[in-house]
Amino acid sequence: MTMVAIGVGFAAIGLYHGYIHNAYAGLRVIAIRGEGLGHLRINKAGWNAKGKLEPEKYMFTREETEKIMKLVGEEKDVVLSTPQMQVVGTVTNGATSTVFIAQGVVPKDEVIIKGDWVVFKPRAGHKISDDVLYGVEMAKDLAAYLNMNAGSNGIVMAQTLAGQVNALDMQVSGVYDTGNDFSNDKFMRFNFKFAQSLLDTQSAERVVVLLKEWEDTEMMRDRLLKKLKAAGIDCEIRTWKELSLGYLKMKSYLDMIFIFIASIVLGIVIMTTINTMGMAILERTKEIGTLRALGLKVKGVSLLFTLEGALLGFLGSIVGILLHIVVWVIIRLFPPHYVPPGFSEPVPMFIDMVPWMLLLLVFCFIILSMIAAIIPARGAARKNIVDALGHV
C-alpha cells in the first residue's frame, strides 16, 4: 500500500508537470506566433517611454528601416525581419461606429510569422494581401457588432502623425478569431502600406525579428543591439517575454499551483512512509535487539532501515512511472478539451513526456523515503538492548 501511495503521488506530480510543460510551450507559441510578436522587437530608443506621446519622433524613417532589416538579415539565425505599425482609430459601417486597434503588417511576412497558428486563419473570406491594399481582416465580435462580413465596405479613421484626422475606405477581406475574448471585439489587421497611408507617413513603428530557435532570443538581442548601435542606429530591443502580457503571469500562476500540489503530495507520501516504517520497526524490535546484542551499532541498524526505505521509494517510483505512462497514453489518444481563461475556443489538453523530470522524481522519492525511514529507525536502534530483546 505504501508503494501504491508513492506511485500515485509520483504519477500525480509527473503528470501535472507534463501538463504545465506543454502549457508553457503553447503559451510561447501564442506569444511568438499567435500574437505576432516574433522573438524580438526593435524600436527607436525612447519609444517605450515616450513613443505613445510623440510617435513621430520615435519612429524609424524609411531609410533606417531598410538599413535595420539589411543588418538583421545578415545574421544566420534570423528567419525574418519585417516592419510593423500599430493604428488606433474609429471604424464605421456608415450607421454604427466603434474604436479599433489594428496591426499594420506586411502580408507575406505575416504568413511566415504565423506559421501553422490556425486560430488566426480567417473564419470567413481570406487574409489580407499585398495586392489589395485596402483589404482588412476584422475580429469576429467587432464584425458582428458592425454587422459586417467578408466583402463588406466601411471607413476607418485615425489621427495622423501631424495631428490631423484622416479617413480611408476599406473592405473586409476576412473575419477571424483572435483566440481571446478580450480582443475579439476590437482588433483588426491592415496591410502595412495601408496603415502608413492612414497615418500619413513613410515611417515604421518597429521591426519584428523571427529567429530559428527561441532559445537564442537573449543572445541574439545582445548581438543585434551592439551591431545596430555600431551602425549608428540608436534603438531598444525587447524580447517576446517582455512584450507578452500573459506569458509571465500565467507561468508564475502555474508554477505556484505546481509547488502547492507537489508539497501536498510529498507531505502525504512522507507521512505514509514514516507510518509504514514505524510499524515495521515496532514489529521487529526483538530482531533489532538481537542485532544490537551481536555487536551491530546504531549506525548499522539505521543503515539497514534506510536501505529498506530507499528500496521502498525506488519500487514505488517504478509503480509511478508505469502509472504515468498509462495515463499519458490514454490522454494522448483521447485528449479532453477545455476552454482556458480568456480563450474563445476549446483546446485539447496534452501532457508532455519529460524524461528528466521523471528521473528527478525518482531521485527525490528515494531520498524522501530514506529520510522517512531514518526517523523511526534511529529511535528504535537507541533502545536498551535488554528491553528490546524482551519486547512483546
Image (cartoon, rainbow, N blue to C red):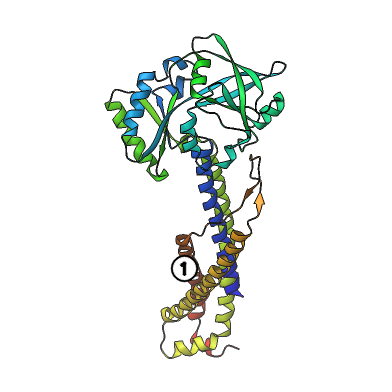
> Quick check: 92 left or right of 259?
right
Quadrant containing the C terminus is: bottom right
Quarter-of-image position of residue 350: bottom right
List x then y, in percent, for residue 183.
62, 31
Which quadrant of the figure has residue 300? bottom left
Measured as percent of width and height from the top left, residue 303 is found at 43, 78
Q: Residue at x 41, y 22 (%)?
A: 46
Image coordinates of residue 53 in percent, x first then y, are: 49, 16
Residue that carries the numbered disc 1 in the rendered image: 367
Task: Judge the density around disc 1: few (<14), some (14-19), many (≥20) Cα neighbours within 10 Å.
Answer: some
- Dot 1 lies on which element? helix
Amino acid type at mark 1: Ile
Q: Position of 52 compared to 260: left or right?
A: left
For residue 391, above or below residue 31: below
Q: Return the x and y of residue 207 as percentages of the image width and height.
A: 42, 28
Q: Nearer the viewer, residue 227 or 169?
A: 169
Q: Residue at x 63, y 56 (%)?
A: 335
Q: Residue at x 48, y 90 (%)?
A: 290
Among the 4 quarters of the image, the one containing residue 351: bottom right
Is residue 330 positioned above or below 379 on the image? above
Between 87 and 289, the one lying in front of the other is 87
Task: From this view, report whether residue 269 is shown above or below residue 193.
Answer: below
